[in-house]
């Protein structure tokens, strides 16, 4: 199925030394891509690299602060000087901060917005510049959330950021589609990761999720692999500005 074959492509996945990012990196590699995994914890990143390499994946690593414009430019320059062109960018790295809005500090708001939204702008802009210059198109896949579309108490900064990710994705499509760059987003539902583990461990929240979700279960990082391969592959060459929710049906029902 060449429609889903990523052979010859290189994918950069931010925040991919664990969780959703690592699962997506593994899936893209298994579809034929060379993957550049990214993380700030060098030990965790090297461990992920070793595991992927032992599984037969073609894997490189990079480590930079996704909120630091100079660090992003330096990391991309280093990859380019090493002859590594990015065909697929997955803006996955993010953070959560759960606190009532009336108690939220300005610095906390800024950190969440910078990590979850501004980073996707900075990295997307710089990678798109390279893609447009190369003239061979590309794929940008931003990782949103259920909170790209709905809210719940105590996660206002995250929700504002993820809502911005959805419309930033549409803006990227508006400006870059003519360069054969497809910009789309994935909205993961409640997936079991380090970030959501406190919610999984909360019996009341856990019961709410399994009751509220039509699939009657939490998602796993592996549930994202098919969608990220689709959006990274020629199969989605006429799909632009969309967000695909991988949420067990939660957003589809009351
Ligand atoms: C929360 C969770 C959610 C999930 C995910 C849902 O506190 O509600 O962290 O935000 O992480 O984003 O799509």
Image: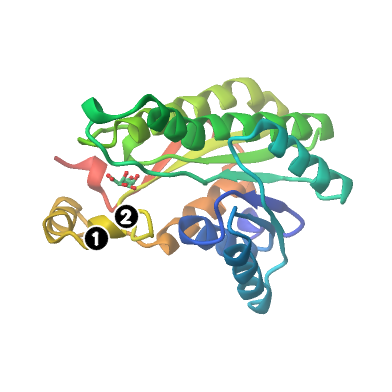
Density class for disc 1 (Cα within 10 Å; few <14, some 14-19, many ≥20) is some
Q: Is residue 85 left or right of residue 22?
A: right
Label 2 CB, ligand 1: below 8 Å?
yes
Measured Cα–Cα span from mark 2 to mark 1: 6 Å
Q: Residue at x 49, y 59 (%)?
A: 225
Q: Are marks 2 and 1 in contact (CB under 8 Å)?
A: yes
Q: Position of residue 237 (x, y in %)?
A: 62, 40
Q: Position of residue 146 (x, y in %)?
A: 32, 40
Q: Quadrant of the C terminus?
A: top left
The answer to whether residue 163 is visible is no
Q: Residue at x 54, y 61 (%)?
A: 22
Secondary structure found at label 1: helix
Q: Is residue 199 left or right of residue 44?
A: left
Query: Tag on residue 212?
Result: none
Query: Which residue corresponds to mark 2?
Result: 196
The image quadrant of residue 103 is top left
The image quadrant of residue 118 is top right
Query: Which residue corresponds to mark 1?
Result: 200
Q: Quadrant of the N terminus?
A: bottom right
The answer to whether residue 144 is visible is yes
Return the residue nearer the eye: 87 or 100.
100
Q: Position of residue 245 (x, y in %)?
A: 37, 44
């Amino acid at each position: 199925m060449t429609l889903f074959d990523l052979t010859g492509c290189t994918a950069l996945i931010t925040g991919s030394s664990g969780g959703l990012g690592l699962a997506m990196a593994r899936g893209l590699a298994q579809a034929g891509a060379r993957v550049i995994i990214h993380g700030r914890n060098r030990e965790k990143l090297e461990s992920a690299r070793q595991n992927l390499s032992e599984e037969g994946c073609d894997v490189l690593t990079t480590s930079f602060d996704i909120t630091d414009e100079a660090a992003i430019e330096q990391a991309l320059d280093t990859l380019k000087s090493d002859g590594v062109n990015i065909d697929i960018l997955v803006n996955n790295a993010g953070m959560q901060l759960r606190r009532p809005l009336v108690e939220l500090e300005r610095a906390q708001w800024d950190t969440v917005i910078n990590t979850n939204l501004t980073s996707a702008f900075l990295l997307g802009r710089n990678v798109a510049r390279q893609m447009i210059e190369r003239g061979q198109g590309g794929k940008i896949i931003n990782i949103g959330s259920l909170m790209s579309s709905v809210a719940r108490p105590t996660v206002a900064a995250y929700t504002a950021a993820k809502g911005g990710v959805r419309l930033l994705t549409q803006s990227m499509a508006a400006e870059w589609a003519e360069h054969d760059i497809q910009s789309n987003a994935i909205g993961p539902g409640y997936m079991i990761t380090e970030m959501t583990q406190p919610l999984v461990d909360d019996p009341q929240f856990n019961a709410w999720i399994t009751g509220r979700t039509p699939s009657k279960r939490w998602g796993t990082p592996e549930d994202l692999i098919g969608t990220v391969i689709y959006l990274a592959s020629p199969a989605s060459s006429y799909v632009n500005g969309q967000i695909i929710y991988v949420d067990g049906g939660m957003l589809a029902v009351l």
